[in-house]
Image (tube, grey):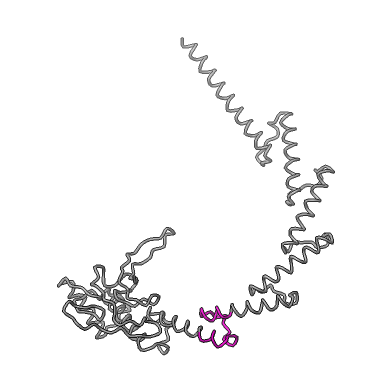
């Protein structure tokens, strides 16, 4: 019985070794057929060597036909050489027609040269019409020059209206200059209302200046309440901070989180409501909107506070948005927005 077991064990070992050897030979053949450097040709049979050679010839032909640098022209047949030459000429024509630097115009046919020149003129017109540096004005027709001039003036107006550095105010019409000035004052009001350093207070109207000052007080009170280093202790900010602290004890809130009634609020017993100022940036209405006491914090993470005037909608910010993380991982701080 022991002898039988020993024989079976030896047979299993021999079978496993033969299987491993076959797997190694099969893998080596695949590597050789694919042209891998790990190929060992000494392990191939004669039929396998022939198949590997045919695979190498086919692979070299594909490389030559595609214009790859690894092409070996000496391995091609005459028929393959002719096809490779035709593919090279067609490829060069595509390069020339697309304006690539690898184009060789000396091998183009007359009809191909005509088409390439036409494609070049069309590309040049698009470059000129878009204001790109690759524009050659000498290749344009008179109608194309007129269109390019109109496009350039339109781009310049957009630059001036958006406050971009590429603006040339001398090219604007009187109406365009007026619109650009209005856009500039609107942007300036948003910058001032947001506390940005690019604010020019000299361009603000009295109504805008009052709204900007109110927003600044709210931001400063929030900074002081949070203990931020950019807190400036003034009378108004101290009052707002004290009111916010006392609100936590009394349980009453207002636009600052305090119990003191703000200009936007209206008590139940009040019969007279404050008038809303009118300007080019605030709608002409007879009354200020009534803001209810916020249930959220008086000021949000980004420094905006309940009741701030939105520079976009020009309405008070009364809706609190909690901080959240976008899909790309960007965190958006909590803020107030208008309805």
Q: Quadrant of the C terminus?
A: bottom left
Residue farthest along the top direction in this orientation? 1
State whether residue 127 is above or below residue 81. Answer: below
State whether residue 104 is above or below residue 27. Answer: below
Is residue 174 found inside the magenta-colored segment of the image? yes
Q: Residue at x 33, y 81 (%)?
A: 285
| 58, 321: nearer the viewer | 321
| 188, 48: nearer the viewer | 188
Is residue 109 left or right of 121 when viewed as pictured?
right
Is residue 72 left or right of 335 when viewed as pictured?
right
| 174, 197: nearer the viewer | 174
Is residue 69 left or right of 313 when viewed as pictured?
right
| 273, 264: nearer the viewer | 273
Image position, residue 28 (x, y; %)? 64, 34
Q: Residue at x 28, y 84 (%)?
A: 275
Image quarter of residue 21:
top right
By secondary structure, the bulk of the magenta-drawn segment is best described as helix
Is residue 145 found inside the magenta-colored segment of the image? no
Image position, residue 265 (x, y; %)? 23, 78
Image position, residue 326 (x, y; %)? 41, 60
Residue farthest along the left direction in this orientation? 250
Is residue 302 left or right of 112 when viewed as pictured?
left
Image position, residue 206 (x, y; %)? 36, 89
Residue stretch rendered in magenta on the structure:
156-178
């Amino acid at each position: 019985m022991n002898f039988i077991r020993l024989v079976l064990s030896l047979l299993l070992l021999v079978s496993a070794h033969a299987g491993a050897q076959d797997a190694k030979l099969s893998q080596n053949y695949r590597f050789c057929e694919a042209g891998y450097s790990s190929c060992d040709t000494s392990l191939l049979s004669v039929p396998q060597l022939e198949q590997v050679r045919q695979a190498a010839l086919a692979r070299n032909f594909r490389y030559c036909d595609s214009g790859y640098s690894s092409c070996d022209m000496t391995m091609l047949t005459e028929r393959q050489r002719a096809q490779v030459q035709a593919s090279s000429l067609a490829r060069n024509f595509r390069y020339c027609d697309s304006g690539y630097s690898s184009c060789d115009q000396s091998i183009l046919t007359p009809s191909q040269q005509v088409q390439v020149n036409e494609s070049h003129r069309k590309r040049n017109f698009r470059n000129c019409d878009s204001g790109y540096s690759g524009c050659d004005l000498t290749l344009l027709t008179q109608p194309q020059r007129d269109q390019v001039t109109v496009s350039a003036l339109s781009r310049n107006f957009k630059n001036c209206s958006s406050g971009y550095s590429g603006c040339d105010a001398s090219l604007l019409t009187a109406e365009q200059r007026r619109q650009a000035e209005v856009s500039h004052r609107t942007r300036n009001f948003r910058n001032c209302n947001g506390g940005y350093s690019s604010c020019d207070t000299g361009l603000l109207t009295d109504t805008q200046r009052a709204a900007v000052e109110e927003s600044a007080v709210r931001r400063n009170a929030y900074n002081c309440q949070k203990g931020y280093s950019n807190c400036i202790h003034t009378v108004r900010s101290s009052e707002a901070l004290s009111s916010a602290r006392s609100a936590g004890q009394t349980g009453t809130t207002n636009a600052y989180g305090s119990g003191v009634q703000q200009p936007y609020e209206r008590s139940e017993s009040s019969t007279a409501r404050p008038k809303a100022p009118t300007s080019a940036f605030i709608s002409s209405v007879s009354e200020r909107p009534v803001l209810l006491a916020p249930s959220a914090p008086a000021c949000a993470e980004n420094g905006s506070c309940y009741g701030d005037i939105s520079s976009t909608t020009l309405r008070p910010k009364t809706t609190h948005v909690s901080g959240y993380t976008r899909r790309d991982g960007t965190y958006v701080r909590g803020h107030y927005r208008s309805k």
